[in-house]
Amino acid sequence: MKLQANKTDRNDAFGLARLVHSGWYEPVAIKSFDRYRMRAVLTARARIVRMCTTMINQIRGLAKTFGLTLSAGKGQAFEASVRRILPDDIVLRDLFKSLLSVLSGLKDQRRAFDRQLARFGREDGACRIVSSAPGVGSLTAIAFVTAVDDPARFRSACDVGAYLGLTPKQYQSGEVDTGGRISKTEDRLTGKLLFEAATVILYRASPTIALKQWDLRLSSRSGSWNARVALARKLAVTLLTMWKTNSMFESRSLST
């Protein structure tokens, strides 16, 4: 297309049509507007959380610069600790108060997003099904549902693990064939939340849940980290199967 003598919009459109007709490309799934809207709120909430963390680190760094020691803790305990060590210098005192005010505003907005996402989770049928699984709250359910959007586009439920970047990287050249950590090539937010859900299942869920029994056996052989990654991938497959069959989670439905 770049080498053609006459580059016009008409010729470009003809060239693109020929490329599509060649069969080299496949249709791309376009998510629904409602899913995009839910995802936008979830992404904004994740950004607010990162901004809160950055602000907390900024306050701790400034306090250390001026020889002020903050006690361990987060949330209200952190803010109370900052107010206890406010210096006498008026400039520094106003600076710390301003930063705390910004942090408080960010937390208020995060709570507003949490309420909105909780409402989305209650109103969406797919989210209600997915959130019936152990360790899966409204955030994880919304992240998974908005990432998949249409479960029918996966021919096999096992494909969802690779789609979410929960499969290991592989390097192969000649006789060399090594596997690495998970690829994280796709939806990192959903993968992170599924990993957190797997952690909850492994350490907090009821021991009668078959998913936990399977992961405990794997953990004894491969270690906790690898077991949680594998459980996150298996959980994604389980959630997609539940969604396709329109069935709630059953603790003993999986035994392998």
Image: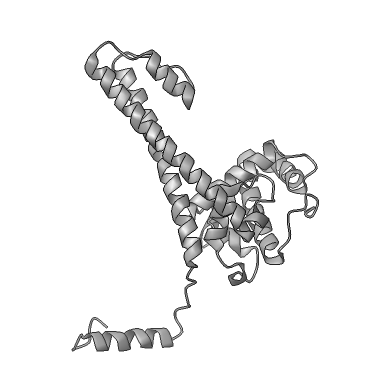
Q: How many marks?
A: 0
- The residue lying toward the viewer, choosing from 9 and 95, is 95
> In this orientation, does residue 46 appear?
yes
Relative side of 111 to 12, left or right: right
Q: Residue 96 at what x, y percent from top left?
A: 31, 22
x 63%, y 71%: residue = 155
x 48%, y 51%: residue = 42
- The residue lying toward the viewer, choosing from 100 and 154, is 100
Q: Residue 235, relative to residue 9: is it above or below?
A: above
Q: Residue furthest top?
A: 88
Q: Residue 11, relative to residue 117: is it above or below?
A: below
Quarter occupied by the N terminus: bottom left
Relative side of 24 to 197, left or right: left
Q: Residue 136 at what x, y percent from top left?
A: 63, 47
Name which quarter of the figure residue 150 lies in: bottom right
Relative side of 46 to 157, left or right: left
- The residue lying toward the viewer, choosing from 141 and 157, is 141
Q: Residue 122, relative to residue 112: is it above or below?
A: below
> In this orientation, does residue 49 appear?
no
x 73%, y 48%: residue = 211
Q: Residue 128 at what x, y percent from top left?
A: 65, 55
x 50%, y 63%: residue = 34
Quarter occupied by the C terminus: bottom right
Relative side of 155 to 64, left or right: right
Name which quarter of the figure residue 157 lies in: bottom right
Q: Residue furthest left?
A: 5
Q: Residue 24 at what x, y percent from top left?
A: 44, 81
Way the structure is coloured: one colour
